[in-house]
Image (cartoon, rainbow, N blue to C red):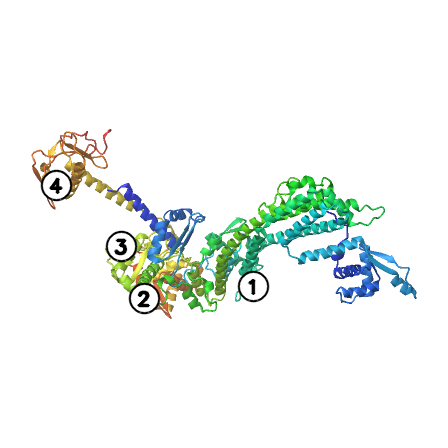
Amino acid sequence: MAEPPRVPPEMFRFATTDRADLNTAVLYAFGEAGERLETALTVEAVRERLRAVGWYAPVGEQELTATLRQLAGWGLLDVIFNHAGSFATAEEYERKNLQYALTRRGEAAFAGVQHATAVLASGGALQTAVLDAIAHRLKELESLLRDPDPGRNRRIFASLRELEGHLDGLRDNTRQFNGELQRLLRVEGSDLTTFHEVKGATVAYLQEFVSNLEQRGDTIAAALRAVAGHGVAVLHARALDGAGLPKMPGADHATPWLAARAARWEALCRWFAPEDGPDGRLGDGPEGRLGDGLGDGLGGGLDDGLGGGLVDGGLGDGGVPRIRRLHDVARRAIVSLLQVLDRITDSRRRSSSAAADFRTLARWFAGAPSEDDAHRLWDAAFGLGPARHAHLGHADAELIPAGVPWREAEPVEVSALLRSRGRTERMGRTGKVRDVVALRAERQERAGKERAELEAAWSALATAGATRLSQLGELDHDTFGRLLDLLGRALAELPDSTGFRRAVTSDGRVEIVLRAPEDGAVAVLRTSEGWFRGPDYLIDVRSPGLARPCPNGGAGGAPVYHERAAGE
Amino acid sequence: MSSLANQLVRAEKEEIARAIRTLLGRPLVSLHDDAAAFDLIRKRRQPLIQWFDYFCGWRLVVEPRQGYARLVKVRSEASATRPARRRRTTRAPFDRRRYTLLCLCAAELLTSPVTTIGMLAQRVVQAAAVEAGVPAFDPVRSEERAAFVDVLKQLEHYGAITAMDGATDSYLDDEDAKVLYRVDTTRVIRLLAAPVPPSRIAADEPMERVLGTLTSEPRYGGDEPTETQRNLWARHSLIRRLLDEPVVYRDELTPEQSAYAASLAGRQIIRRAAEEAGFVLEERAEGFLLIDADATATDTKFPDDGSHAKVAALLMLDLLVSAGPVRAARVDAEAAELLRRFPQWAKAYQSDGGGPRLAADALEVLELFGLARRTGDRVAALPAAARYRVDRGTAVQEDS
């Protein structure tokens, strides 16, 4: 694309000075006059017309003259000396002699202002009617072209201009609409319902537009092809003829006119049938690229914010008509709008109520009668407060039955140092580290005792070779418990081929071999708690790792103290 | 004979108990703040959620990915003794101004996932300006900025905002400090625990009504509860108090709660709750208390040497328990006597009026732990104070 157009210097200066209002009003006065085909105005006439364009503030002679002179200085007005009038006095001559007229630049500036305000005021739309109109004009052109009568050329010209007008309308409106769409996606409506309505309406509108878009696009593309079949050059030549441009020596109006038509045609093709390009595309000159540029502007616009709707046009976009892309973009917009709508509605509904909650709380806090009330409100509303508990208890809580009054129960043990009146440093040192030496020693002692008891029990049971159960005779209760455990383990095993059952305690230190008595004898064992009667099993208890009280050794292993023999 | 399975069961029980007490002590446990505790809660969240729901009807929300666990505590009675505290060494409680700013900030934080300290301050200025009854916020003044920073640090502590660039403290000196925050909006919302949204309550209600309405829970049937709902309420409200308060006296209970506490089922449930949470239940004629031996579930300890007031409180307690209800002046005199006897001790109180100040602070400690009560001019020990009485004869004689 060529570099951006250059605005002549100072062309729009008039709109930026502190007299911008008056400047603009004066330009409007000239514009108004131009429509009535009055091209030159005196100072007096300007003053009269100011009223007509809605400028009522008083303007001094000097001020108005200065304004006119300033505008002339910027090249927007021409000063013309009127010698044709009749003047009675010298003063009148000086005043009326000077007339002002808009220059080309002035006209352009005025048109710019008008256009700018119009764009500001208008809203974009996607109009299916415009698409229909384009199709109609194309069909009309096609039928006109079929008639070689030069008398038809004027009609061809008119149709062509209408067609171009509709295309411009489509392009402008689409661009504007897309702009609004993107703004809509960004905007954060403060009022949820309005927000909802606007977006809902937009989605409905888009759906309506999209519904028959494809079909309309195809119709237009077909019509385009039909017209192109007659030759675009022919079309333009006949339109030129029908246009009846003024023939002025020294100025070639026809060439730029034709170039402009070609550019428009190119744009039309890009929109509806780019693959038909070779016929319609006259654009290997700079004019051809102009059309590209316009189209690209739109493409970029639609693309913006919709996640790659239209790939940048350029020369490589042949193949896919813009109208198809518009279709895609519209559809994607519907989807994303609906998503955004959902998301926003959702998050707003939730966070708006939470925000309202916080604001309400802020009001309450600010208006709390006292600090204590504020603390209680904090506690009730946020529930972030910690629990609070005593940490000193009795060594054995079970010793004091429930339901005793506190006064009668033993007091808990409070560090004596804590009571030694005010000596916080020492308390600090002693309070932090708990002395666990005694506790550990006590635990060790207890563990050692248990172990010793256990080993004593095993030792009492250890047999020197196979023994009858009945031979054990009297046992103390603990040892008897161990014996039962061993018998249980052995009986849980299946007997081997020789009828022996073997089992080992879970720590692997004691082994028992048991055999059911063949004679069916019954053994009776006495303990301190009672007596036991059962089959008089033949048992052999071996505890290879234990000290053995019986001097004649065991069958199982060497008498090693507190150490397991290797391999056991 | 202990097997591996048994040990696992015991470890699990122990972990659950620890997690329960951690959550009671800190209803919002964050990964960024205490990774080990959060990990434990995350791992045991299923039984924990059930535990809190069954015993006290509190909702526990664990967000494994977002990195926080929130115990939504609803107290049966709002207490003024657990204020939010500034995240500074003084740990001074929040004032109304800070609470107000905290709420305004929270409301404004909900609008965007990322913000800077300046933008947030600006929004709070605007919000304070339109909110009726809320004083204007003026970040130009340094004490206002200090309050604002306290609030933001609190929010950072909860993990509601995270400073991605810069430090909040820099705002104290410089109004143009640049701090970029990421906002965890759901966590901001989770800060609110009230079962009734505040915005649904008419703003002009008096504070007492507001507090009552905020914490009313529909699951207990409101004004006309069914039998089941009443039972549920008795259980939950009683255990809530037990889990949160240092002492629960029988004469403070409602008839339903008393009946529940006296019933066989009630006693069993209380016992189970205490045991499963790793507390020791102390049940006496006058009431109950839970002992948390490793002080996980408590914000402060007593008896303790953490402050002069606490040491004094323990000594005051001896007077109160042995001498019965005394006049406030007697307590003041005792404190003054202490200060006189130990001139090197408690320097902050060694000035005019130090005695009454020390006495007041000590009494506050005792009140926090439900050990003493002040009615008018008289100060009386409450029954549980007898736990800490001196056993005459066995007391160690001090050597100075």
Q: What count of labels does the image hold?
A: 4
Q: Looking at the image, do the residues carrying marks 3 and 1 touch, with CB atoms under 8 Å apart?
A: no
Q: Nearer the viewer, residue B382 or B324?
A: B382
Residue type, label 3: Ala
Mark 1 chain: B
Residue type at mark 2 is Thr
The x, y position of residue A324, in whole percent, is: 60, 46
Judged from the image, the secondary structure of the residue bearing numbered disc 4 is loop
Give the alpha-carbon distance from disc 4 to disc 2, as whole Å.
Answer: 59 Å
Q: Secondary structure at mark 2?
A: loop
Can residue A454 be spotted in the picture? yes
* Distance Cα–Cα, label 4 vs label 3: 36 Å
The reply to whether dot 3 and dot 2 touch (C-beta < 8 Å) is: no
The residue that label 4 is drawn on is A475
Pointer 2 indicates a residue of which chain?
B
User: Residue B232 appears in which quarter of the rendering?
Assistant: bottom left
Between circles 4 and 2, the one closer to the viewer is 2
Amino acid type, callout 1: Ala
Identify the mark nearer the N-term, 4 or 3. Answer: 3
Residue under circle 1? B129
Residue A397: numbered disc? 3
Q: Residue at x 8, y 38 (%)?
A: A522
Position of A290 compared to B71: left or right?
right
Which mark is nearer the camera, 4 or 1?
1
Same chain check for tags 3 and 1: no
